[in-house]
Amino acid sequence: MTKLVLNRRNTLQLLGGSAGALALPYIIRPLPSWAQSNVLNVTTYDKFLPQEFLDKFQKDSGIKVNVRLTDDQGKQYNLLAAEGANPSTDMVTVAGHRYSQFISSNLLQALDTGKIPNWKNLNPAYQNAPWAQVDGKLWGLPILAGYEGLAVNTNYVKDPQSWDVMFDPQFKGLTSYIVSDFMTITMQYLGFDGDFVSYTDKPEEALKATNAARDHLIKHKDMVRKYYDAGSEVQQMFINEDIYLGHAWSGPAAKLIADGHPIKLSVPKEGTYGFCYTLNVVNNAPNAENAYKLLDAILATPEVGASMQRQSGFASTISGVPEALTDIERAAGTLPQEQVERIVFFSPVNRDMKNEMIDKATAEVKAA
């Protein structure tokens, strides 16, 4: 992917072409074993922080980085909530639309950009992005972004323009999707608000829209080869030609494209949703100053962002990354401008209602 910017509708555009409470003094409360001046504990996703980058950072800074891998936002939240004022990790990786949950529970520090000299190297669209702010403060460094798209094997499916193709009888048994994610896409496809922002204080309207999408997916259940959960699953199904098309996140799809598989990812005319991962300093982090040093190092050169994008398949937020990518890497993440405009950035508004209704409808689709 080449460039990410936000437009006035807070949609996601793909890359085209004060610290919190400090630990108490030692004589009052001994620092836990993980709170050492030369240590940094980071919870993040697999392939988000390249090992080569970490090796160089550790050599240059003298800070030992301990990486704890996660695969779920909820797991990070539950761990921090359970540990309370004595967190065992200094940094977590939160998606922007989950901010309200972490912030309302006092689990994150507001970001002090004055401690990040290389902040200027962040793509300007992200430096004061509305979605990244709560109560007038920034809460994390945007690092990687992506979107949900329609992935097709171009040997069998030719340039679809609508999500209609996912329900076309000629592809019966040859589609796949993550039920909970595709539920919101189906709502949008049917003309409803799949992000639930307009349903605040309107539970009956929201339930009607959710049930309409649920019923549509149940009606067309015979279209689906398999419901999947992990990106590796949909990748393997495409490689094996078990499916010809499906709903996919841009990261896994971009990896297939970059590896030379005949896959194309697009945003149909009805639109889709996007998100951004951020690195966040934990409230009461024992090694908060080291966390800021890592954030600054990430922004030091476009090559770091290019490596993160190359490994994860998601788009980097760092300026100058496109020039550090190969032609095929850029091609794997490029969207026409009209498709870019169709991507709505996930909002943190009304998340509890959305999660509750989507989770229930998802279970009903799977059980049908």
Image (cartoon, rainbow, N blue to C red):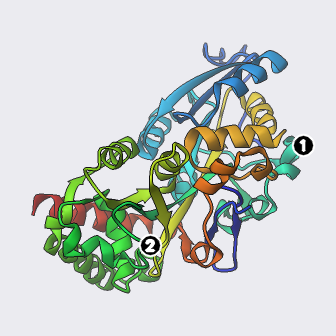
The residue at the point 84 percent across, 19 percent down is 60
Q: Nearer the viewer, residue 349 or 211?
A: 211
Name the secondary structure under disc 2.
loop
* Residue furthest to the left: 368
Task: State which quadrant residue 262 falls in.
Answer: bottom left
Q: Picture coordinates of residue 348 (x, y %)?
A: 53, 65
In the image, 246: left or right of 109?
A: left
Q: Residues within 10 Å of mark 1 (few under 14, many from 20)?
A: some
For residue 16, above or below residue 187 = above
Q: Residues within 10 Å of mark 2 (few under 14, many from 20)?
A: few
In the image, 359: left or right of 154?
A: left
Q: Quadrant of the N terminus?
A: bottom right
| 2 or 1: mark nearer the eye | 2
Q: Picture coordinates of residue 152 (x, y %)?
A: 39, 62
Task: State which quadrant residue 66 falls in.
Answer: top right
Name the secondary structure under disc 1.
helix
Task: Inspect the image, locate mark 1, and give the three-letter code of the amino acid beneath it.
Answer: Pro
Provide the residue designation for mark 1. Answer: 117
In the image, 218: left or right of 331?
A: left
Q: Nearer the viewer, residue 17 or 185?
A: 17
Q: Picture coordinates of residue 288 (x, y %)?
A: 73, 32
Provide the residue designation for mark 2. Answer: 159
The residue at the point 56 percent across, 34 percent down is 47
